[in-house]
Image (cartoon, rainbow, N blue to C red):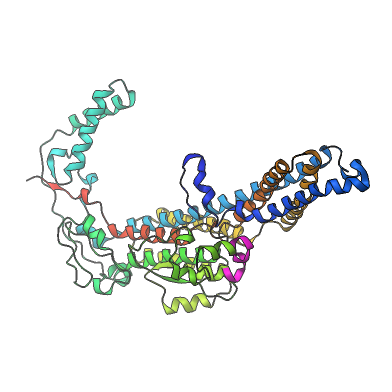
Amino acid sequence: MILYERDVFGLRLLLRVHGSAVYKSLFPTLLSTSFFVAIKMSIPWCSLYLGASGCTPIEHPYVIGVLISFVAFLLTFRLNYAYGRYWDGATGIHLMLSKWLDSALALAAFGYQNQKYYVNQPKAFGKHPHLRRQDIVGGLQKWQLLEEGTKLAQAESLEAGLRKKNYVKLKLYNSMTKKKSYKEPKREPVPHPKGSLTKSISSIRADASKARIPIPLRFLRRFAATDRIETLETPHEPMTSQNIPYPSLFMQELAHLYSLLGAVALESLRANMEGVDMRIIEYIPGSPWPPVDPDYLNRDIRSEYGDQNALSSIFYFITGTSRTQEKRTLYNAARPLGVLGGVSDNEIAALRSCQGPYAKVTLCSMWLQEFITRESLKGSTGHVGTPILTRIYQFLSDGMKGYNQCRLIAYVPFPHPHAQIATCFSIVILFVLPLLFSGFVSSLGLGALMNTLTVGCFLGLHETARELERPFQSPPNDLPLTTFQAQLCEALISVYAAYNPNLFWKLKK
C-alpha cells in the first residue's frame, strides 16, 4: 500500500512511478500518439493521389463518438467493480481481525475472574454501594478530575437539560449515601479447588524463565505501582495489588493461538504457489512496524525477490513481470508474518498435512475453539455463565465470515469475459482515436497533445482497475497484511495488562 501526503493539488503524487497507473499506461499512449503523427504527416502525400476526400474517410465525429462512449462505460463499470473489490477486501480484513481480537479480549477478561486471582483483584464498588469518595484511599486522581470537570461543565452550561438531570441525580445519590465510614469485611485468600481445575493450564503459574511468549517490560513500567522493574531472568514474586503478574499459561496460549490463526489466514490470502510452505516466523513484541510500502524495505530484503534498486522495481512493474505467481511468492517469502511464541515443529507438521490454505485456516480455528471449550470447562474463565461464553464463539464465527469474504476476493478473479472485452477495446482505442484527431484537428502539436491525454485517460482507468481488483496480490498497491498481523500481535499482548492500576483502592482507617 502506498502512503502519500495531501499537499497542494497533490503535485507530489506525480513523482511516484512504482505503482502508478499513469506511468504504466504511458508506453501504449505514446505508441498511439506516434500512430497519430504518422497519419497526420501522411495526409499531404495521400491527397496527391486520392484527393482531399480520400484521405479523410471520417466526415463526422459522431461515428467514432458512439464507440468511445461504449468503451468509456465499459471501463467505468470495470473500475467501479474493481474499486468495490478493493474496499470489500479491506473491510473483510478489519472485520476478521477485530472480531477475533474482541473474542480474545473477552476471554482474557473472563480469565482474570478466575478464583486464583481473587486476592489480587481490585475491590469492587458493587460490594460497597454506600461508599463515598471520602471513604477510600487510592485511585483518587481520576475521581477528583471527574468531579472538577463536572462542576466546570455545570457552571458553563446550566441550561443543558441532560447535564442538569445528571446533576440532580448526583445530588440525590450523595444525600442517600451520607453514612458513617465502615470497615470492609476481611478478604481471605481463596485456595485453588481440588480436582479438574488444577489440571487446567490457567492454574499453573507461568514462570518468567519458562514463558513461551516474551513478556514486554513496558507493561510493567506502565502498570506496575512499584518502581522496581522485574526482568525475565529473575523469578517473579506472588501477585499483589502493587505489581502486575506475569500472565498465566492460559493467557499465553490464548495469545499464541489467536496470532497463529490470524497469520495463517492472512498468509492464505496472499495466494502463493501450490506446495510452498507458509512463511511464518516468531513475532518479538516491540519490534518496528513492517513498512506498508515495499519501496521502504531494506535493500537486503528486496534483493530476496529480485528488486535490487528502484529502477529494477519500476522496470518489473511497468513491463508486468512482477505480477507472475513465482515473483509474488518470492515477494511474500521476503515479508513473513509473525506469530506470538513462534510455531512449533508439531504445529508445522500438522499444517503441512492439510491440503490447501483453506484447510490450514480451518485447522487453526478448530485448535482455538477446542482450547477455549476445554479451558472453560476446567474453570479457566471463572464463573462466567455459559450463555455469555457463547458470544465468544459468535465472534469467532463473525471473524471467519470476514475471512471468507476476503477469500472470495483472493481466489475468485474478476470475470474473464468482462476483463477480456475491456482489454480488447482498450487496444482498439489506441488506433481509433488517432483517426478522429487526425481528421478534425489541423494542428499537429495540439492533435498529438489531445490524443495523448485522451488515450492516457482511457488506459489509465484500465490499469487502475487491474491494480485494484486484486487487493492482496498486487504490490505495491496491495493491502499491508504484514503490518496488520504485527498490529494484531501487539493488540493481543494487551491481555497481559490485567487490571486498570487506578482501580486499586482501600478504605480509610
Residue 374 appears in view:
no
Where is residue 391 shown, x and y percent of the image?
A: 44, 54
Q: Residue furthest right?
A: 50
- Give the quarter of the image for residue 271: bottom right
- 457 vs 177, left or right, is right
Q: Residue furthest left?
A: 509
Residue 82 appears in view:
yes
- Give the quarter of the image for residue 187: bottom left
Q: Measuring 64% from the left and 46% from the top, which residue is drawn there?
A: 80
- 378 vs 118, left or right, is right
Q: Measuring 40% from the left and 58% from the top, which residue is drawn there?
A: 487
Residue 504, compared with residue 330, is above or below; it is above
- 400 vs 34, left or right, is left
Where is residue 2 shown, x and y percent of the image?
A: 50, 54
Residue 212, compared with residue 139, is above or below; it is below
Where is residue 5 shown, x and y percent of the image?
A: 46, 46
> Magenta region: which residues?
316-327
Q: Is residue 465 magenta?
A: no
